[in-house]
Amino acid sequence: MHATLQSPAATQRHDAMPTRWAPRSPVEVGPQGNHLLAALPASDWQRWSPQLQLVEMPLGQVLYESGRCLSHVHFPTSSIVSLLHETASGASAEVATVGNDGVVGIPLLTGGLSTNGRAVVQSAGLGYRLNRQVVVDAFNAGGALTQLLLRYTQALLTQVAQTALCNRHHSVEQQVCRLLLLNLDRAEGNCLQMTQERLAGKLGVRRESVTGVALALQREELIRYARGRIEVLDREGLEDRACECYGEVKLEYDRLLPSGR
């Protein structure tokens, strides 16, 4: 398949990129670098593949806003997307993370053309997008594709529910470890594009709280932190420090979705 790289929309929002470290240019891995696309039944793949558009997903790009109709669904391959909810005052917190494991645009499958949340690219990379009607029509037709998307929806809801539980009952350190591991599962290698400020915003806590945790993890040589970049040095150590929420989410994804994860 020959895909054309699309320019990001004029309405996208960009966060300031760190000056001490710049991520490498995204490498195209093909649509089957997304595990849901790789698991499509052959007949659906034949219908979808000519219509998939390769798109660049830069840091800070808003894929959908609260209250606005969704025009496309996005299948990240090398990018990672935060699903966020905001208060009336503008404060926000992340409810789920989507990467090469899934799709951004689940509200379309549940009958809604819009949502009260927003989706923002948190790690730059590439992905594929598909017109919403193509997905809705295929979903409504039933069959193996519908079952695949329903299983993904269940896994995503598990992540949302576990995030709510974690934010209420677990320490900031446990929450930070959970988020790092969730993102690591969806990243290439052991490095994450993530500032402390952005990490604090995802958790809905003060930056000082995250700074203290990052320093502690670095002292114990679990991570190495530079501005805008977190390198995970000891994944098993992070898993030991995380709460059970990360493991519960991972088990549900592994149970419901293709083993290609």
Image (cartoon, rainbow, N blue to C red):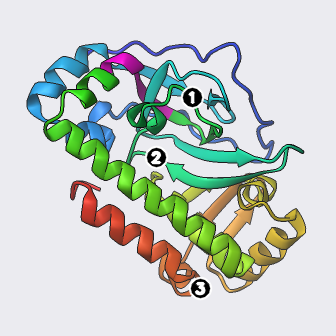
Q: Quadrant of the C terminus?
A: bottom left
Instruction: Tell me the chief SS of the magenta region.
Output: strand
Q: Are marks 3 and 1 in contact (CB under 8 Å)?
A: no
Q: Position of residue 98 (x, y in %)?
A: 49, 47
Instruction: Tell me which label, 2 or 3, sits earlier in the chain.
Output: 2
User: Which amino acid lies under the numbered mark 1 shown in the image of this protein?
Assistant: Ser
- State which quadrant residue 211 falls in: bottom right
In this view, the mark in front (3 or 1): 1
Camera-nearest residue between 215 and 167: 167
Query: Which residues are drawn in magenta?
Result: 126-134
Camera-nearest residue between 201 and 80: 201
Q: 9 above or below 219?
A: above
User: Which amino acid lies under the numbered mark 2 shown in the image of this protein?
Assistant: Gly
Secondary structure under the numbered disc 3 in the rendered image: helix
Secondary structure under the numbered disc 1 in the rendered image: loop
Q: Residues within 10 Å of mark 1 (few under 14, many from 20)?
A: some
Label of residue 114 in the image: 1
Report the residue at 51% width, 75% height from top: 245
Label 2 – label 1 distance at C-alpha: 21 Å
Report the residue at 83% width, 76% height from top: 212
Secondary structure under the numbered disc 2 in the rendered image: loop
Q: Position of residue 111 (x, y in %)?
A: 43, 31
Q: How many tags in the picture?
A: 3
Residue closest to the far front: 111
Report the residue at 68% width, 55% height from top: 229
Label of residue 99 in the image: 2
Report the residue marked by disc 3: 241
Q: Are marks 2 and 3 in contact (CB under 8 Å)?
A: no
Q: Is residue 227 left or right of residue 178?
A: right
Residue 232 in view of the camera:
no
Q: Are marks 2 and 1 in contact (CB under 8 Å)?
A: no
Q: Position of residue 169 (x, y in %)?
A: 67, 81
